[in-house]
Image (spheres, coloured by chain):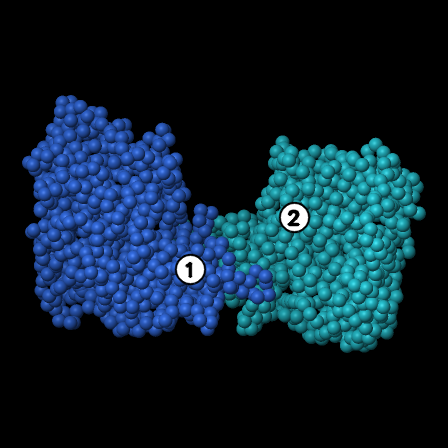
Chain colours: A cyan, B blue
Amino acid sequence: MAARKQQLAVVLLFLLGGVLSFPLGQDRKDALTCGYEVSYLYSFTALCFGLRGKQQQVAKAAAAAASCHATKPNMLNVHLVPHTHDDVGWLKTVDQYFYGDRNDIQHAGVQYILDSVVDQLLKNPDRRFIYVETAFFYRWWKQQSSSMQQTVRQLVNEGRLEFVNGGWCMSDEATTHYSAVIDQMTMGLRFLNETFGACGRPRVAWHIDPFGHAREHASMFAQMGYDGFFFGRLDYQDRARRMMAKEQELLWRASDSLTPPVADLFTGILPNGYNPPEGFCWDQSCDDPPIRDDPDLEDYNVDDVVKRFMAIAENQALVYKTNHIIMTMGSDFQYENANLWYKNLDKLIRYVNGLQSNSSKVNVLYSTPSCYLQELHRANLTWALKTDDFFPYADSAHDFWTGYFTSRPALKRYERISNSNLQTCNQLEVLGGPVSRKGPFGGGDKKAMAVAQHHDAVSGTEKQHVANDYARKLASGWQHCQVFQSLTEADTSSSVSVLKVVPVSKATQEVRRNRGFAVNELVFQVQAPPLGYSTYSVSLLQDGSPPTSTQHRTPTVIQNKFLKVTFDPDTGLLSTETCPNDRPCVCVCSRYNASDGNNSLSIQPSGAYIFRPNSSTPFPFYSLQPQSSVVQEVRQWFSPWVSQVVRLYADSRALELEWTVGPVPIDDSLGKEVITRLDTSIQTGEYFYTDSNGREMLQRKKDFRPTWQLKQSEPIAGNYYPINSRAFIKDDVDQLTVVTDRSQGGGSIHNGSLEIMLHRRLLYDDVRGVAEPLNETSDIFPEGLVVRGRLLLSLDRPPSAADAHRPLAQEVVLQPLLTFTDGDLNPNTRLEFSGLQAALPPAVHLLTLSQWDKDSVLLRLEHQFQSWESKVNSQPVTVNLQKLFSTLDVLGMSELNLSANQWKDEMKRFDWTPQKGTGRPNLPLTSLQ
Amino acid sequence: MAARKQQLAVVLLFLLGGVLSFPLGQDRKDALTCGYEVSYLYSFTALCFGLRGKQQQVAKAAAAAASCHATKPNMLNVHLVPHTHDDVGWLKTVDQYFYGDRNDIQHAGVQYILDSVVDQLLKNPDRRFIYVETAFFYRWWKQQSSSMQQTVRQLVNEGRLEFVNGGWCMSDEATTHYSAVIDQMTMGLRFLNETFGACGRPRVAWHIDPFGHAREHASMFAQMGYDGFFFGRLDYQDRARRMMAKEQELLWRASDSLTPPVADLFTGILPNGYNPPEGFCWDQSCDDPPIRDDPDLEDYNVDDVVKRFMAIAENQALVYKTNHIIMTMGSDFQYENANLWYKNLDKLIRYVNGLQSNSSKVNVLYSTPSCYLQELHRANLTWALKTDDFFPYADSAHDFWTGYFTSRPALKRYERISNSNLQTCNQLEVLGGPVSRKGPFGGGDKKAMAVAQHHDAVSGTEKQHVANDYARKLASGWQHCQVFQSLTEADTSSSVSVLKVVPVSKATQEVRRNRGFAVNELVFQVQAPPLGYSTYSVSLLQDGSPPTSTQHRTPTVIQNKFLKVTFDPDTGLLSTETCPNDRPCVCVCSRYNASDGNNSLSIQPSGAYIFRPNSSTPFPFYSLQPQSSVVQEVRQWFSPWVSQVVRLYADSRALELEWTVGPVPIDDSLGKEVITRLDTSIQTGEYFYTDSNGREMLQRKKDFRPTWQLKQSEPIAGNYYPINSRAFIKDDVDQLTVVTDRSQGGGSIHNGSLEIMLHRRLLYDDVRGVAEPLNETSDIFPEGLVVRGRLLLSLDRPPSAADAHRPLAQEVVLQPLLTFTDGDLNPNTRLEFSGLQAALPPAVHLLTLSQWDKDSVLLRLEHQFQSWESKVNSQPVTVNLQKLFSTLDVLGMSELNLSANQWKDEMKRFDWTPQKGTGRPNLPLTSLQ
């Protein structure tokens, strides 16, 4: 490693949220010499942002107000929002969607949508359109002439084309990790900012399709500066109650650790999903009657259309609070021929408003979510408070969308590893200096990861060929990361390098390989410094025959200084794990057979989206032959297609369960959903805890929702929640935390029990659009996919549990990158390197370190402990940024919002007043802590 | 009737085709004082045309040449013709198609097509589009702003938007009568002429979809001034031979009576129906891959697309004569979002022509049919000659489109009666003077009739609800004809008026009513003068009980001075009709059972388009009980659902068979196709004769085609031809002519036999798109449609047969209009009136007399005898137009083309050179005469 230090001309750093002492003057270009107090779960973001932002911000505010059509205070104002929902892959790949290829699968071509919308906006200045998915917009923009680009800039500046959400995609909320979500949002918003300036900054988050909504997403949106959030899907019982109570618009307090209003987000539930009201879909994909306004024809229908519209508007107004209502005039891939929509909407507005001279009190107008939101804000009301999340999502009594928490477990893991590699590469690119930025970099890796966050990507709800495409793109992204070679080529020829990039604390890792077709395994223990690497040399000393494995046939025990694990000699199950207080903990592998839809209660089968077992009693597996190996591990064979290795590392408090499931047999014509269940004597009182996007923990309770009286209709599927990185159960004495290596679904069905779904193979489509059974096969796995993964079990006292599971989970999320080269170790090789001058404090996580442009980097630090979870680590921490890096001189900094598209001190969000209350009206009297 | 004479300021009269002495000076406004020699089957047309035509004609010629893109003489030039095919009703009604209503049936909205095409033409001046159906264009045009109209005019003037065909619709060729076709073409072309001037005049006829092609249509197109004609469908064997022989482009000599080149029409057969080549359909309705030309993407496919296109072009060039080929880039209702097409076509042209710098010899360009035709004309080659027609059409060995000749017989008759009424009303409007033009006139009647000519209207190949809509429109059109009241109100209060409007000769008619629910029939004989009316008063003398009918139970005979008809006492069949030479003639009612597609040869069932009996042997019906009535008529009951009345009028040479069929029973799960077969001892040698669109007669021969060696695969359906107004069989001695009252299908399967299909009811769809079995039921006929019609049988010596069947057929086509009023006869009532000073000569038929505008009328006279069919009447005739009318003064006239959109002396058509030969290479040595 060249020992040179880079001179970064401008490093702008911005602290988001919370109360901070800010020792710098107003000039953000001042050199940074002081430390920062990082309190709770905030994120640092740092980048070169230029200085044009401030002026345009003002212009934007003025333009936005001016571009909204006037409303009428004494009338019911109906905001028509023309929009398209363009999945970044689903039934077709993202490329197929862009060009309009494979229209035999689904008619959709985004290039034409944007062509057509721009044309139609130009025809009538009253018209409005919103666009959401920057992954598509970016591709279209690249292909436009400069005059067309200028035209579009003008439309944006005039508020006729408005970007909402604006991330690279509309991310899934259940199965995405916050790290990747922030990245994909930043990528999309950066493009909009650099292309359109402040007028291109979305003011509204817009998640109209994701299947349930995570609190952490709301928190992130708040910290990204959004004024409000709209979505379309929520539990049918929840919606019914909210309609009655006029609580479909609410204030979401999205963190229990951040001081309001930092994570407060005004949230609106759209009236009709994201579709137009019935009978008013005028897209080419719809069949509703157009407005036939030629009075010479006998099929003249203007009176009928107007009458139906007025009735719908008046009914909708009954379930919202203000004299403004919103109608989403569009749907999936609509507006490919925008003329159909606009021609009829123009007529609708003309004819409906024409009745105002005849005492009608309905006023209909082209609008956007931000114009609608502005009117809600002006109404100056108080709004219902919400502090939990919107999981799980059920659209009917037996239709819980909890299957996709686990669907496509291999893809889910591959996405997670790809994120880890991407973060590593981003960091190495910064540390490697200019030389490392030569070569095939170009954001391909970042785009593949951004696309994978889409709510039909990592969610597992896409068609098989599309899932293959996501995986292929991720694999291709890996090729972009050749930076390690440039970083080490000057002074290393190491055989094995371990890069440790999670600057939490020094950690012990094992160098291990998937055995694959190899006969032998090489196992040894290594260490790597934070934000750096260690190099190990491996030589073959003797070309002898491999040692035979030692097999223990009697009751097996493995143990280290923290844990003792025994296996039942009869069932082979991991029957007793020595908890700190000797309470038993049994691990059972089981499976549910999936509903095939042939059921007296409902015809709903289990599918990619929906989980529905055909019985609430799982079928347990018993281990055929537990075997311990030379190291502290025991192999359990539950069946020919379910096995597990239980490992205990010498220095670890966590027990590793490496499960292997597949090919799931289907010769009995039954789909199967395989779980691991941990049965303990912990007195959970039916409470359990799951994380939100890998960050804050949320309390769950069996057969219970905090904000409405639940009628439970699916005893298993209705109690499943996303487990993005971990879940735990606890009582006053013990806490069992399970850290996962990917997003999975799970729940606590019995007292003291926690189950996690590992894999699922299904024979029926669940009729939510994907039109394929989730039955993963491939050339490599013609009999069905085999999936392997890890669960890390940690047993602790509750007050100190987070001190263990927080770093543990980060180690799983951001794992060391192993690289291998042949050859002898060069004696000049530098065997170890760290980009940090010293390890960060345990509470602080380096979330992002990424080259922004030639002279600046983006840095995000987060405090990773919730306010209540650790006596030690939940305290504020101070980090001296100037002394952070070993190879970088920080010359300046400025604080930005979480998504790096706004100065922190210019981030002015609407203020909203909550109604009194906790936001959890049904919550029993139990503390989260 | 007021006895005033109207002063017509300008009557311009134009004689089409043939050699004429034209006694007027060049100034067409000169008063007309002389007679005209009307030779053979020519048509007179007369209208006020204004005088701007001449200048614009010159401009048009220049513009057309200039607007065609340059081609490259040493390359293969590929003419891409963007087009849409917009059925004037089919699966949806014409109104539904226009607005895009009922897209659940079929996605199609013509208003949006025209919106979109104009937008896209403006984006790139190289682009071209053709539009065909004026019924749609007219509606769209009415709704445009004046600035949009100006924009479109500019596109037309620059040749970027070109009208082809240009009639109100693209008429069916098998089942339409020439009178109605000329009217609908005139209506469309008039609109184009008045809106766009000469630049809007179509130069190419374009019948890409009709299911077989009539020679009379080609003749009409020639006389309308078209330079050429393109179509898409012809017999699969015919196409195969023509491809081998490079005879897909040919010269059609479309009349055996008109002197070439009057009825010569250059005819091109399109390479792919009217669709784009496989893999190159870029409409929103298609699934072919778009051109993905972003080189950053791995799905870049430009090289593949170009390679495929070049291969297709080079293959296509092998079966055409010149170095120009045409590709139809469009299809049914395409271009609703024209951007998809043009964006990809732009790229295709760019990338294919880009290879010319790399020695490619393929040059691709936007083009139109007239630009393509111009290149063919410039090639200055000789072309194969064709003198027969393109019926029947088979697209495969067992798939003969001969069912639609009869499909929906009730609609076919209703259309024919409506035409008769329309002609009557048009004439009365002229005769009635200005007073008759007040009120609800507005072309509604004309439009309904024009729409009904469409190739999925009168053809019977539309969905049931669309057939209902055509009928409703026709009924509504009848309401527009209130002119008779104004014509007679001043001086009549007649009870029954008979209007005779066919100025052929004085005729005897019977006043008869459909019996319906009435107990009694009033039968008496009346006469009406040509182009006039007679009034009869009917009074009830005694309110007594009706007379009982007299029934004859013994062998029945009816006779008049010309004919004697006997009925077989055993079978009840009309067993012997006394022919002039006492040769027997038996009339058998039979039925075929329809194929249900369950057949070893082919799965093709009988359907709306296709006729396919499941056996070649029909099932005969025998009369249960022949009954004669008080008049010269005998009722035959063949079955509960097949009956016939045989009538003989005192002064008539024709025997009338009034058949009633239905409801056709289907409880045996068999579709049925009911025929009448006339078995005679005439020695036909397997020849028979059918008319073309009600005009010229064509010779047919069983299992034979004049231009290729037929492999007959369907012995019945493959020998069916359209019988539009008549068919005959003959030998040297006798000719049996059958005049029909509507279009029907029929053939001569056996020597001396002629069969005509009356009705068909089918249980399967024939998979040609209509997606409904032809199973006509309604509220009124829940058990199935009952249809009644007439066949008129005339037995003559061949040399004089036409003298009988020509006027007979005109009487059926243009029947007297009966009107009824209550009340006593006013003593001042004028009982009889004629608009003519004297009856026209028998050879001359007044085809059209219609008010054109305030000061002019359109007059068409035709010579209605083919050159070979009558010693007396095939001779030239002279008519003195000045002395023609009794109530009109003709102040001026000018001759126009048949469609009245061009001066006759400005009609300059391309001249083409035929190859040597008769055009009927397989014709045996038999004369037509």
Type of residue at label 1?
Ile
Q: What residue is drawn where x is 66% and y is 42%?
A: A761
Q: Position of residue B895 (x, y in %)?
A: 18, 64
Residue B86 versus residue B343 in the image, above or below: above
Type of residue at label 2?
Ile
What chain does badge 2 belong to? A
Q: Nearer the viewer, residue A713 or B926?
A: B926
The residue identified by callout 2 is: A780
Q: Quadrant of residue A865?
A: bottom right
Q: Quadrant of residue A371?
A: bottom right
Q: Nearer the viewer, residue B240 or A115?
A: B240
Residue A663 versus residue A366 in the image, above or below: above
Q: Position of residue A886 (x, y in %)?
A: 85, 70
Q: What residue is drawn where x is 14% and y is 48%?
A: B926
Q: Position of residue A904 (x, y in %)?
A: 76, 67
Q: Secondary structure at mark 2?
A: loop
Q: What residue is drawn where x is 31% and y is 63%?
A: B321
Res. A618 in view: yes
Q: Position of residue B816 (x, y in %)?
A: 18, 45
